[in-house]
Amino acid sequence: MPTQRRMQFVRGHVAWMVATVLVLAVLDAVSYELVFVCSLIGFLIVTELTAPFNVTPTWRRRLRWLVLLGLVGFAAVVVRRILAILPPGVMPI
């Protein structure tokens, strides 16, 4: 049973990532940042949709670290985008 849940999680996330890349390719908007952010959103959605009600398996507890790393990466993308928008003379400390 645990392997089935794990595979359901992996299949869901891979399907989300493939759909993300296909949609971004159709829209001609493929970039590393957009693929990363959309994959992170999908990862969070699939994590919540496949969460068990009663007991949390060990492999799901380790997902918290991946979520944390993903949020740090998201913060880095946001900071890069903000710095790209600011005029050259205006630089926060």
Image: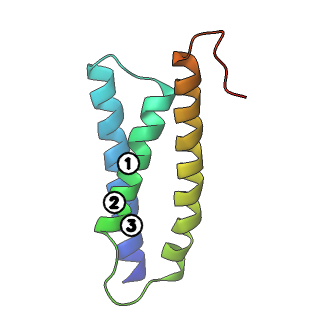
Is the residue 69 above or below the residue 9 in the image?
above
Quarter in which the C terminus is drawn: top right
How many other residues sit within 10 Å of disc 1, few (<14), some (14-19) or many (≥20)?
some
Q: Secondary structure at mark 2?
A: helix
- Single out the mark in the foreground, 1 or 2: 1
- The amino acid marked with disc number 3 is Met
**Amino acid at pointer 2:** Val
Give the labeled residue for mark 3: 7
**57, above or below 76, in the image:** below
Q: Is residue 75 left or right of residue 89?
A: left
Identity of the residue drawn at 32% across and 70% down: 50
- Looking at the image, is mark 1 or mark 2 earlier in the sequence? 1
Report the Cα–Cα distance between label 1 and label 2.
9 Å
Q: Are marks 1 and 2 in contact (CB under 8 Å)?
A: no
Residue wearing tag 2: 46
- Left of 91 or right of it: where is 68? left
The answer to whether the residues at label 1 and label 3 have Cβ atoms under 8 Å apart is no
Residue behind mark 1: 41
Q: Residues within 10 Å of mark 3 (few under 14, many from 20)?
A: few
In three-dimensional space, the C-alpha distance between marks 3 and 2, rounded to whole angstroms, equals 12 Å
- Tell me where residue 39 sits by quadrant: top left
